[in-house]
Amino acid sequence: MPARPSAANRAPGGARPAAGRPPVEPAGGPAAEPGGGPAPAAGDRSGGGRGGSRRTGPGSRRILGLSPAGLIIAAATLLAVGLRAYQLARPGHLLAATEYDDGADFGSALRLVGGAIPYRDFITVQPPGITFLMAPAALLAKLAGTDAAMAAGRILTAAAGAAAVPLAGRLVRHRGLTALTIVCGLLAVYPPAVQSAHTVLLEPWLVLACLAGAVAVFDGDRLATSTRRLAWGGAALG
């Protein structure tokens, strides 16, 4: 013979609950959970916010649409651009002769766009990468003269030096904000990095290519599984 329902399981007013239906919730509040405490309200189930929205901590707040990591990378990149632009804006740095190597490196690009082939028609001690990278700027010499073309090459090199900052940030941002700040800040203000970006030299392009290759090859602390990414990373490092 089935047991009579206890008084605690009866619906308000003493009526028995219908078979197969759960007990009716008391009018005074939500039904108790097995643990003994009252069940949380709908707005409390995901952290106490209204409408079930979760509260976000200070580290997840966005400013101008950027996360804290994005703000650090953007600030360091702007600092890097400012330092390199200031250096080029100083008297005698954009159009004057300041180095010897930049003349040889940019001169090889001028010879290339003029129809000469490196290592066959003229001698250069550098690999051909800088020759091909400077070829678009060297084309400007046909329209505005060699001095304007050299200035364009210097601006491109300064931009390459600054572009290394966001790539380095992308590479280490999974390590946390402290590591991100140190890496991006040092790369933005490191004196040899700033100095080498004042004219057409190999170092800014070398750093940029190596960082681009590392970003393509690595997913966090592991190698990427995409064959295409590995191929592009190898090409950039090469």
Image (tube, rainbow, N blue to C red):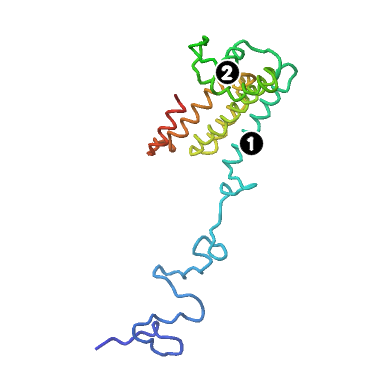
Q: Secondary structure at mark 2?
A: helix
The quadrant in which residue 230 appears is top left
Label drawn at residue 75: 1
Residue drawn at (62%, 26%), measured in percent from left and top?
156
Can you give x and y, in whole percent of width and height, for residue 191 in the image? Answer: 62, 20
Q: Are marks 1 and 2 in contact (CB under 8 Å)?
A: no
Which of 137/170 is in front? 137
Can you give x and y, in whole percent of width and height, for residue 74 in the image? Answer: 62, 37
Could you give the CA–CA distance between mark 1 and mark 2, rounded to whole angstroms? 34 Å
Which of 188/98 is in front? 98
Q: Is residue 25 above or below residue 165?
A: below
Q: Quadrant of the C terminus?
A: top left
- Label 1 Cα neighbours within 10 Å, binned few <14 / some 14-19 / many ≥20: some
The quadrant in which residue 21 appears is bottom left
Q: Secondary structure at mark 1?
A: helix
Q: Is residue 113 above or below residue 72?
A: above
Relative horizontal placement of residue 175, taking residue 7 as reference (left or right): right
The quadrant in which residue 7 appears is bottom left
Kind of residue indicated by mark 2: Ala
- Label 2 Cα neighbours within 10 Å, binned few <14 / some 14-19 / many ≥20: many
Relative horizontal placement of residue 64, taking residue 43 as reference (left or right): right
Q: Is residue 204 above or below residue 28?
A: above
Residue drawn at (46%, 31%), measured in percent from left and top?
214
Q: Quadrant of the N terminus?
A: bottom left
**Tag count in the figure?**
2
Residue drawn at (53%, 66%), measured in percent from left and top?
43
Which of 39/106 is in front? 106
Q: Which residue is mark 2?
A: 109
Residue closest to the far front: 115
Upstream in the sequence, badge 1 or badge 2? 1
